[in-house]
């Protein structure tokens, strides 16, 4: 029997795209006295559960990332496979 | 002339758009349900403001895959007139009918107020009823209206004259203070290269009668009506 596989997709703003949320968090950290943190970039992640017998799954993950999970105009993504 | 107003789960300006067309512009209008694949013979499709699908993932990201949008894309590709307002603009960028993306407002707050827009080109399907450089007073109401595009993308928009509306001060000057969300180049509204798809963050449907505070928004709807009645556009839809 095939067991379920997992993957985590991380979506981040591309370098150079302004991240007001990250900037605001960084400002808060600085105000809290944590001056050691030079910058903060925010993002989000998605945990995917995948059928054990699914084929061609890397391509499919790539496809859903570029079609739905990330907006390629402003975001980039990376995939971490959890076997 | 028939207008169709798309209703997604979470749309909340669909009735405003409907009322603006029906009661003020006095043209025929019908709602188009998001699960339908039928534009009901609309000559103009309006994607209204709101929070389609709860703005989950990104504003407009899920609405883009609804059955009605498949038809709207086909309609637009064959030259049909499409107007996306606020969330409708976000849907149009997500589905690729308009270039760029709408990001969180740079100050991170939801912004709901009257702004001034400068009409950059009055020779288009959406601005024909305006004067060139005319200042329109129209409200905004959004948290994600910060227009972004690559440098080349913005240059292309500017060079092609696709920027139709810009946030300005009362005198018509483009200033950082007049920019309510951090949009590149104070961009408030753009059209596609073919000139048949408009996306704008401000809400013209909320400014169609003096009693609402301004009737300037009516000019967008009136422009569309006038344009579609022109002989050059007959048969395009």
Image (cartoon, coloured by chain):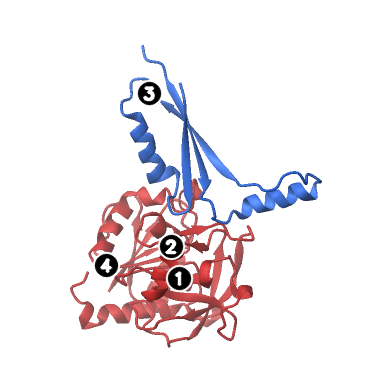
Where is mark 4, residue-wise?
B80
Q: Colour of chain B?
A: red
**What chain does mark 4 sit on?**
B
Q: Secondary structure at mark 3?
A: loop
Residue B136 spot, x, y in % from top left: 51, 81
> Measuring 38% from the left and 73% from the top, which residue is drawn there?
B162
Of residues B198 and B39, the one nearer the viewer is B198
Picture quarter with the N terminus of chain B: bottom left
Q: Secondary structure at mark 4?
A: loop
- Give the quarter of the image for residue B132: bottom left
Q: CA distance from mark 3 to mark 1?
A: 44 Å
Q: Chain of mark 2?
A: B
Q: CA distance from mark 1 to mark 4?
A: 18 Å
**Image: B76 above or below B206:** above
Q: Relative to residue A29, is residue B102 drawn left or right?
A: left
Q: Which residue is mark 1?
A: B189
Whichever of callouts 1 and 4 sits on the residue coming sooner in the sequence is 4
């Amino acid at each position: 029997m095939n067991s379920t596989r997992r993957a985590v997709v991380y979506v981040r703003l591309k370098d150079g795209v302004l991240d007001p949320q990250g900037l605001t968090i960084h400002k808060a950290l600085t105000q809290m006295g944590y001056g050691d943190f030079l910058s903060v970039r925010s993002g989000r992640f998605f945990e995917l559960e995948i059928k054990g017998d699914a084929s061609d799954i890397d391509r499919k993950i790539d496809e859903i990332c570029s079609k739905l999970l990330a907006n390629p105009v402003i975001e980039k993504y990376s995939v971490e496979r959890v076997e | 002339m028939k207008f169709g107003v798309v209703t997604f789960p979470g749309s909340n300006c669909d009735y405003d758009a409907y009322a603006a067309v029906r009661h003020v512009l006095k043209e025929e209008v019908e709602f188009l349900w998001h699960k339908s694949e039928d534009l009901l013979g609309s000559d103009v499709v309006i994607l209204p403001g709101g929070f389609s699908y709860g703005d989950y993932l990104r504003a407009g990201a899920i609405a883009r895959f609804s059955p009605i949008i498949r038809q709207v894309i086909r309609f637009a590709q064959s030259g049909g007139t499409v107007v996306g307002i606020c969330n409708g603009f976000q849907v149009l960028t997500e589905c690729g009918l308009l270039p760029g993306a709408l990001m969180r407002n740079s100050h991170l707050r939801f912004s709901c107020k009257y702004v001034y827009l400068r009409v950059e080109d009055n020779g288009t399907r959406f601005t024909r009823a305006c004067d060139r450089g005319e200042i329109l007073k129209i409200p905004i109401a959004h948290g994600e209206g910060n227009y972004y595009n690559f440098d080349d993308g913005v240059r292309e928009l500017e060079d092609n004259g696709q920027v139709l509306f810009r946030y300005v001060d009362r005198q018509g000057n483009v200033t950082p203070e007049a920019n309510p969300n951090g949009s590149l180049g104070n961009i408030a509204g753009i059209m596609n290269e073919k000139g048949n798809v408009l996306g704008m963050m401000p809400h013209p449907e909320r400014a169609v009668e003096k009693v609402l505070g301004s009737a300037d928004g009516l000019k967008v709807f009136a422009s569309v009506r006038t344009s579609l009645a022109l002989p050059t556009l007959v048969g395009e839809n």
